[in-house]
Image (cartoon, rainbow, N blue to C red):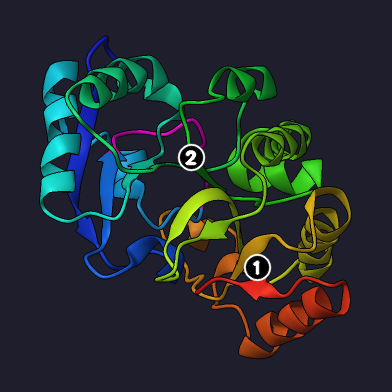
Amino acid sequence: MGAAPRVASAQLHRGEERPLVGRSGSGTIFFSSCNLRCVFCQNADISDGNVGREIRWEDLAETMLRLEYAGAENINLVTPTHQSPMILDALALARRRGLKLPVVYNCGGYEDPNFIAELEGQVDIYMPDMKFMDPDLAERYLGVRNYPECNRASVCEMHRQVGDLELDHRGVARRGLLVRHLVMPTHAEDSRAVIEFVAHEISTNTYINIMDQYHPAHRADEFPELRRRTPAGTVAELREYARSLGLHRFAD
């Protein structure tokens, strides 16, 4: 990345979790590239292909304000980690110019917990992935062996800052943590470990999306175990397991 923000797209998006979408949609800004290299990435053209264009951070601030004017429920920063310095400058300017919307930090979950601590007061809603608990799986599929330890520590820090997800009278998120976990076609035991961590170490009041939309994409064909969709029964069993541990707020 260079010194300027690189943005792939900015739009009102209705494909996010229901608490983020509300009536008009989430004001999503997709940033080019990523700090992970997931072999099954479903947005590889953006995350790996560096699609998009560089803009001034002042123009990024105006984009945020345009999304607010268009009726966005929030400003949803998608894969912001590696561009955070530029984004934070733009966000500060947008707020000086009147931005009032909640800010969503929508990330892959590979974060430095010390940096997440520095974001306190800048982010209203954290929406991290929790992909894997097993370092071997993280190394095989994400390219980084220390993903689990960074992920666990960062998600704990996110929850410390903003707590459980708070909804307004319309059911729209205003503040808090929403965790995503994509269920893979194999390794259900690792998915159980993710669910156990959320229930035991975060909160049983956590909003969690146990996602069933895995499909082979990007480089998944290079891995025989990833060449098929996740069985619906596996996802149903994991959701029931989450309920058995006390989790009861499920996003979709």
Quick check: 247 left or right of 196? left
Give the image location of residue 65, x and y in percent. 15, 36
Going by the numbered disc 2, the residue's amino acid type is: Asp
Residue 249: in magenta span:
no
Give the image location of residue 3, x and y in percent. 26, 9
The image shows residue 95, relative to residue 166, as above or below, that is above
The image shows residue 78, relative to residue 120, as above or below, that is below
Read off the magenta span: 31-39
Cα–Cα gap, marks 1 and 2: 37 Å
**Residue appearing at x 30%, y 24% in the figure:** 91
The image shows residue 56, relative to residue 94, as above or below, that is above
Q: Earlier in the sequence, mark 1 or mark 2?
A: 2
Work out whether residue 37 can be spotted: yes
**Residue appearing at x 59%, y 18% in the figure:** 115
Judging from the image, what secondary structure is the residue with disc 2 in?
loop
Work out whether residue 56 can be spotted: no
Give the image location of residue 40, x and y in percent. 50, 56
Q: Which residue is mark 2?
A: 124
Q: Which residue is mark 1?
A: 225
Is the stretch drawn in magenta largely helix, strand or loop? loop
**Residue appearing at x 62%, y 73% in the figure:** 250
